[in-house]
Amino acid sequence: MKYPWKVMLASAVVASMLLTGCSSTSNTNHTNNTGSAATAQTNSTTSSSTEPVSQEIFAMDTYMTVTAYGDNAQKGVSDAIAEIERLDNLLSIGKEDSEISKLNRSGSAALSDDTAVMVTKALELYKSTGGAFDITVLPLMELWGFTTEDYYVPTDAEIASTLQRVGADKLTWDEKAKTLTLGDNQEIDLGGIAKGFTSSRIMEIFKKDGVTCGMVSLGGNVHLLGTKQDGSEWRVGIQDPDNTDDMLGVLEADDCAVITSGAYERNFEKDGVTYHHIIDPATGKPSNSGLTSVTIVSKDGTLADGLSTSLFVMGKDKAIAYWKQHADEFDTILVDADRNVYITEGIADGFTPDSVSADQVQTIQK
């Protein structure tokens, strides 16, 4: 079985990231278990403070690139790659000996610290988004064939039957004991927040190792540390959901995660109808919210990852209302089926339209 979070096309790319070095950022003290040694090919091995160390790896069913600057860049990249591999082995629903696979088979388990953190965050998001984010949708992903790429359009009866196994409110979570018990025939998948959690962990590793600045791209999830060498911000391209060869626009950003979910990432066509992989837990079908792309910008990669899916399912009006309640935690870029772009005020000044006109861009204020 494959991960249901495979990214066919990157949903956010970093423009001109490797053209310059970065300015220094402050260190914070963190400890991490980095697991086994990295095995991916290294594109650059220089450790100069002005030249990047960059390494690619295929994990979590997507291609990832880790790039760091500074005298300790090589150590930072090596430790980050090892951590990616460790988390992949922990969380993969495609690996029989992973913690999540064992939980899904047994129905109950005491979880490791990292998995417990993600479960806690996932259940918080389930509650705050009114169920739009739900880690128990794996049976629906399997029903539609998104986990195997053996695509299938189920009947309403099949969807209704599978929906009985869905709902994070059916989970029993003992946060103190870190024990999760699934409901009848339930399965979970943390893929909706795992890459965001991983990117935040890499930022911690970079800081611990003394990396002055860098970035990680996890299948289109971009997380940035620091600014460019001249003190200016990175330029992150947001993919056009209607033409993936184009950029909708460019966002200037630093020290944050920029994570996009779009209907174009994984989909299939049957009898002239296109079905995408972002399932609405309420209906059991691909979300029909009127949005085609949602980008979340936040210091918290785990939050950004979860909300990119949640706000997509909510639709424009509910997504904007949710942002107004949580504006201190994130900003967002919403794109609807008519190619209108709605961008929250916290990042509006840093966004430059590309494949859309300025008239199509509206700033959302609190």
Image (cartoon, rainbow, N blue to C red):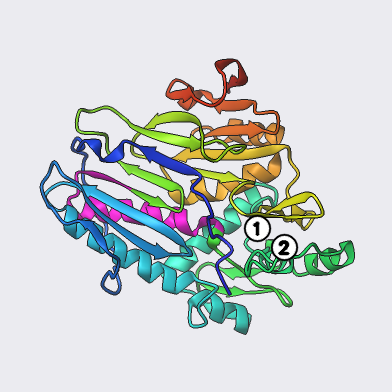
Residue at image mark 1: 134
Q: Quadrant of residue 312?
A: top right
Q: Earlier in the sequence, mark 1 or mark 2?
A: 1
Label 1 to label 2: alpha-carbon separation: 7 Å
Q: Residue 159 at x, y = what percent?
A: 82, 64
| Contact (Cβ within 8 Å) of mark 1 with mark 2 | yes
Residue at image mark 2: 167
Residue 129 vertical placement versus 33 (above, below): above
Q: Residues within 10 Å of mark 1 (few under 14, many from 20)?
A: many
Residue range (magenta): 192-215
Left or right? Give the position of 175 relative to 350: right
* Residue drawn at point x = 74 percent, y = 77 percent: 184
Q: Could you say whether the residue bearing mark 2 is in a helix, strand or loop? A: loop
Q: Quadrant of residue 281?
A: bottom right
Kind of residue at disc 1: Asp
**Helix, strand or loop: magenta stretch:** helix
Residue 144 vertical placement versus 199 (above, below): below
